[in-house]
Amino acid sequence: MLLLGYPIFVKINAMLQRFENFISEQALFNRNHRLLLALSGGADSVCLFNLLLQGGYQFSIAHCNFNLRGDESNGDEQFVMALAKSKNIPFFTRSFDTKTIGSNEKKGIQEIARNIRYEWFFELMKEYAFDKLLTAHHLTDNVETMMINIMRGTGIKGLHGIPLNENNIARPLLFATRAEIENYLKSEGILYREDSSNSSDYYLRNKIRHFVLPELKKIQPDAELRFFDTAQKVKAYEEMALELIAKQWKGLSEKEGEIIRINIEKLNQIENKPSFLFYNIQQYGFALLQVAELLNSLQVGKRIYSPQYELIRERTCFLLQPIKGEQVAFEILIEEKDQNVHYGNQTVVFHILKEGIQPDFTLKNTLFLNADNLLFPLTLRIWQEGDKIKPLGMVGMKKISDILTDKKIDNSTRSSCLVLQQYNNELVALIPYVIHNDYRISPNTTKILSITLNLA
């Protein structure tokens, strides 16, 4: 861990003026607000600390020690504590066993760290009546975030970049690049801590930071500002579009208690029906492919399901309503042919491999069954308490509930897990985790059924 810079001193400068102008132009907060600053000790948050101090704002400091870098993490905490005491700023700190929490919740370290710190920040805000949480995200962070979202596949929201002022979180450094912040700290002689993990290329963000962005800036020197402007325009255009969507939705839907009636004739006048309908009902757990399937069917009584809702085609309208009783109402027959089944945000793809094609057991979320031994049609349904299967390599039966527990499947996921059942009620697969031992592929197998689970 490096300690960079020189002792803090205060003077009026161009950076402070830009800071004040940005806060005013974006209406982020004012000097009457009680502010909570997330301060890691790194260049960005120390810069924000100094600008708030120079600007005369009322603020307190919150620091998270994630205990991920040994003595470096403790050194960061001591540095921030000393900085707060030197300026008589109220200071909060909390230590987290981040690795253990991540292991228990089966999530990545970065995601866990983000979740636990914001949870704690909001606890502080509620307990001490802070008006705003301030984080030190800047223009370069914004470019990296947008690139990551694009590379992972994103909708409009992923093109917003980092929000300026949302959910009581304000980001007043989104006018400055990382280089501008570091130059400011150097010119002001301000001490800060350098996180050694920033030099690693293990994380995608760091790869973009070290390799992609420098090349991009050779082509477009003000790329960071261009990305920010684009993000703001996208957000503004989306807000206008959402106003129109809400107006159209109100004109063709009617809510009666828990039931929503959607007028088919009026819906047919919408140019992009699948996307329009999906946008308005996705909150109920439906997937775009399901919606498209329903719209392409003229069959009265045709239904699609999410874990808690069903959408039914009537003669003049679609009925959106909660599923009554147990979710086992979801049952679909699977024929001996290629078939796609949509349920909530899941799509199950059934495919009969052509003779001579060998199964690729490295495929994610894919099972292979010996179709020679299957008696079609099969039934695809939600698993129920008491369901059992004989897992691959086992002699006896095992409860589905125990398998899901062993695999540490969370409650929200396990409630919508699907099983494949033969006519005699024998389960042949728990998708996409387990196949029945008696239906495994053997050298004598001539027909193979592949089952792939895709999540929207």
Image: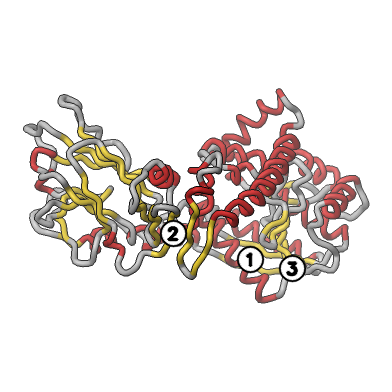
Report the amino acid beneath label 2.
Answer: Leu
Residue 98 located left or right of residue 344: right
In this view of the protein, can residue 289 be seen by the observer?
yes
Report the amino acid beneath label 1.
Answer: Phe
- Element carrying mark 3: loop
Q: Distance between the residues labelled 2 and 3?
A: 39 Å
Judged by depth in the image, the label closer to the viewer, 2 or 1, is 2
Report the amino acid beneath label 3.
Answer: Asp
In this view of the protein, can residue 430 be seen by the observer?
no
Q: Earlier in the sequence, mark 2 or mark 3?
A: 3
Residue at the bottom extreme of this rendering = 127
Q: Position of residue 113 (x, y in %)?
A: 54, 57
Residue in the image at 75% along x and 37% along y: 225
Q: Earlier in the sequence, mark 2 or mark 1?
A: 1
Residue in the image at 87% along x and 63% along y: 56
Query: On residue 121, which mark appears?
Result: 1
Front residue of 401/238: it is: 238
